[in-house]
Image (spheres, grey):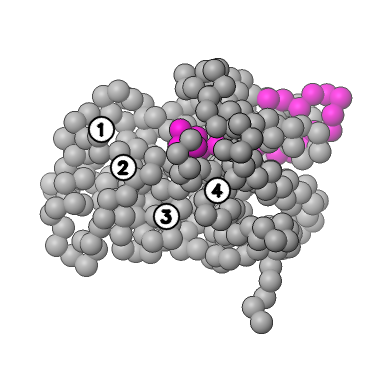
Amino acid sequence: MKKIVTINRHIMEQERTLSDKPSGDFSNLLTQMAFCAKLIGRYVNKAGLVDLLGKTGNVNVQGERVMKLDDLANQTILRAFDHPGYIAGMASEEEEDVVLIPPHRPRGKYILFFDPLDGSSNIDVNVSVGTIFSIYRKITSGPDAKMEDFLRRGVEQVAAGYVIYGSSTMMVYTTGAGVHGFTLDPEIGEFLLSHENITIPDSCAVLSCNETNYSNWSDTQRAFIDHIKFKREDRYAKTTGRYIGSLVSDFHRNMLYGGIFLYPEDARHPRGKLRLLYEANPMAMLAEQAGGAATDGRTRTLELQAKEIHQRTALVVGNRREVELYEKFYQGRHLT
């Protein structure tokens, strides 16, 4: 009989490998995120039945129309973490400023970043969406979180992960000891280990990018795309184009099948479009832990220093061979 491992058990075992004196807070934090995933997954699955489709009429700090499920997912995570005492503060795609835990509530030693519902523009057409999260250890003294605790480099993450709400609900996470995936069994309401020690295949089976931006890309960026599509003559050459428009969905497929996801800077987004702290950094950590890589074209994503909570960045992430090849094209080194 196959060993049954719940996500709670796995998280506790992971914490014991990371610390000689585990406090339990880290395990509880990740377990609470798994609980949020169950709630949000239920909302997503019932959205068409309980009037949760469509827009709220509000615009978030990114200048994007807020979907009803965006708002509900955001409030679910905020309320789940504002009182247990695991964190000192959090930052969300949907909140203009950081959210500090008030003095009258217990505060912990971690900082939480999250995108409550990635790919929410796909909600109304029943395409897979997801939640992304990233966890840092607080670095300033005292119980209050300060801005220095938030403006960090991705290499400082202690955990990162995502939840994908599709034909099944899956939570995938890393604490720096490999990448592991758990599928929600709806009959018992538990996440069970289904994908242990995920590694990105060496072959680039999938190219994921929005090619309607092709004319806005630089000559070197277009040269890379053309090379992948038309000019390779090696054992990696069987690459197909697949783009969903949900970072979680595109990344999840590419991590399992092998592939590269690109959202580089372009004429309309000179700094890139994706957010560094709660989109690019967690995906970069997961990719590296699965044997892949992530870059903005010049710098390893995890080495980028955040200067703003909602800082944008270019992101190229996936199997290491193609990411390194992109850097060569981007920097003009493929000609030498």
Q: Which residue is mark 1?
A: 213
Residue 327 at x, y percent in the picture: 28, 45
| Cα separation between marks 1 and 2 | 9 Å
Q: Which residue is mark 2?
A: 209
Q: Could you say which disc has been placed on residue 39 in the image?
A: none
**Image point (74%, 37%), residue name:** 80
Q: Is residue 260 left or right of residue 144?
A: left
Q: Which residue is mark 4?
A: 165
| Cα separation between marks 3 and 1 | 22 Å
Tag 2: residue type? Cys
- Tell me whether circle 1 and circle 2 mark residues in contact (CB < 8 Å): yes
In the figure, 147 relative to 319: above or below? Answer: above
Tag 3: residue type? Arg
**Counting residues from the N terminus, which is met first, the one under dot 3 or under dot 2?**
2
Q: Is residue 311 left or right of residue 228?
A: right
Q: Which residue is mark 3?
A: 253
**Image point (41%, 48%), residue name:** 250
